[in-house]
Every structure is written in C-alpha cells, then in structure tokens.
C-alpha cells in the first residue's frame, strides 16, 4: 500500500499530476479542489497523502492500479468518508469535491443543501443522503472551516473540563446554567458573528455538558434553528433549545 509520495511536482494536467521520486514518476489523481493550488507548485517539491485502489476497466473485465493524492492525511480521511455514501464512488467524488473539504463538511453539518447541490454531480437526493449519513461524522472537519475563512460565530472549543453536573435546570437559571457548563467545557458562547458549523457544535457541546445525549442535543439545536433562523450565536441557540423543553422561560 502506497500511503505517501514525496517528490518534485513535474506537471498538472486536469485532475492528473505527475510527481517524480528519484528515477520513478508517479501519476496521481487529485480532487478538483486541489488542482489550482498544485498548478502554482509545479517545479517544486510536494507531499501527497495517497489512496491506492483498483479501477475497473472494460465493465469489470480488468483492473488498473490507481493513486489518489491529497494535501493532508485529514483530507484523505474526509474523502474516504464521502465515498462511503451510497452513489458516490471514487471517480465521482474526485469530480464533485471542487471546494475546500472543510467548507463541504460545514455544509453537511449545517444541512446546507444549496451548497451541496452546487457541487458537480451532486443532486438533491445525494446531498440529502450525505447529510443523513455523514452529519455526525464530520464535525472535526467542519471546525476547520471557521479558521480557514478567518473566524465567525462561536468561539473555538478549548480543552475539556468537568461536566455540568448539578447545574440548575430552572426557568430562571437556564441561561446561567448554559454559561456555567460552557465555562467548564472551555467553550465561549457569547461571541458574535453569523451562524456556522462551529457555532452549532459549540451549542451542542454545551447541551451535552448539561446532560443531553449528543443526538438529543443535535435535535434540540435543529429545532431551535427551524423556529428562529435569525439565531446567530451559541448562547442564543442554547437558550432557544432549553426554551423548547420549558427550561429557559
């Protein structure tokens, strides 16, 4: 199994690149999102984290070994997740993933079907399947989207602390409880900015600290967003979620 190739980038031709390693040159397929970046690196050294697979030819009569290269091991892992979705094979994923992977992950977390269906070869049914099958698996990738675009709503999750045990769940103290749990978890929930995946994940984390299961916390946040699309901070999401259970008001 070839898992990494390091060498001089000789050429970029469409979605195919050639990397020379000593006297050997490897032809490697790359996702559409990486083509532009790699064009600017022709003639320099690159490191590509690779997947090695067999591609069928002649309706399965024969198979050819192929390499796919990614700029990081994390990108490779995300690609492997995407190809577990029914109807998205390796070749389709290579063509469809035309924007940075963290942004795609954020769209999955946020159920942003408009963005997902804007990707080549991703129709609404496939986009809905991506959300259904991957939403609880791509949080770590979505979190990178915020730093990639220079921030947004919701503060970054820091080192975890003690849970929110014993937190008062009274109507009057619900928002204070959320703040206490957030502080214990190392999560800032009063930062401003637009609603994004990081904000949603911060709010889910607070509800988990308050004793909700992760799936129940996600469902409460989803309902809060459906009721009030203007919510833009983790603080507001948590308060709205608690209100739906009769805790915040």
Image (tube, rainbow, N blue to C red):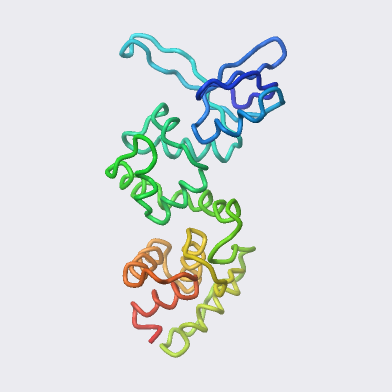
Q: Nearer the viewer, residue 27 or 136?
A: 27
List x then y, in percent, for residue 30: 53, 28
Q: Quadrant of the N terminus?
A: top right
Q: Residue, x 31% and y 47% (percent of image)?
A: 128
Left/right placement of residue 244 relative to residue 18 reads left
Left/right placement of residue 139 relative to residue 130 reads right
Q: Quadrant of the C terminus?
A: bottom left
List x then y, in percent, for residue 35: 55, 30
Residue 212 to residue 53: above or below:
below
Q: Quadrant of residue 63?
A: top left
Q: Residue, x 67% and y 29% (percent of image)?
A: 41
Count of numbered badges drawn on the protein: 0
Residue placed furthest toward the left: 125
List x then y, in percent, for residue 97: 45, 37
List x then y, in percent, for residue 198: 52, 60
Q: Nearer the viewer, residue 68 or 148?
A: 148
Q: Residue, x 61% and y 28% (percent of image)?
A: 39
Q: Residue, x 64% and y 24% (percent of image)?
A: 5
Residue placed furthest toward the bottom: 172
Q: Quadrant of residue 25?
A: top right
Residue 40 to residue 177: above or below:
above
């Amino acid at each position: 199994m070839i898992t990494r190739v390091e060498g001089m980038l000789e050429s970029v031709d469409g979605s195919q690149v050639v990397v020379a390693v000593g006297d050997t040159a490897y032809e490697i397929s790359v996702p559409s999102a990486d083509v532009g970046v790699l064009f600017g690196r022709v003639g320099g050294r690159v490191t590509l984290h690779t997947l090695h697979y067999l591609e069928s030819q002649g309706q399965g009569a024969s198979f050819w070994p192929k390499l796919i290269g990614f700029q990081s091991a994390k990108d490779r892992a995300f690609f492997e997740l995407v190809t577990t979705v029914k109807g998205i094979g390796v070749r389709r994923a290579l063509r469809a993933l035309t924007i940075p992977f963290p942004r795609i992950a954020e769209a999955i977390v946020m159920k942003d079907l408009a963005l997902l269906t804007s990707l080549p070869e991703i129709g609404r049914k496939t986009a809905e399947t991506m959300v259904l099958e991957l939403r609880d698996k791509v949080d770590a990738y979505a979190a990178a989207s915020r730093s990639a675009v220079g921030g947004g709503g919701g503060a970054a999750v820091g080192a975890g602390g003690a849970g929110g045990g014993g937190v008062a769940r009274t109507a009057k103290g619900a928002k204070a409880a959320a703040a206490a749990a957030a502080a214990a978890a190392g999560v800032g929930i009063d930062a401003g900015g637009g609603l994004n995946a990081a904000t949603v994940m911060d709010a889910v984390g607070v509800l988990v600290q308050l004793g909700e299961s992760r799936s129940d916390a996600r469902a409460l946040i989803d309902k809060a967003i459906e009721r009030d699309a203007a919510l833009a901070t983790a603080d507001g999401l948590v308060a709205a979620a608690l209100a739906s259970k009769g805790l915040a008001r």
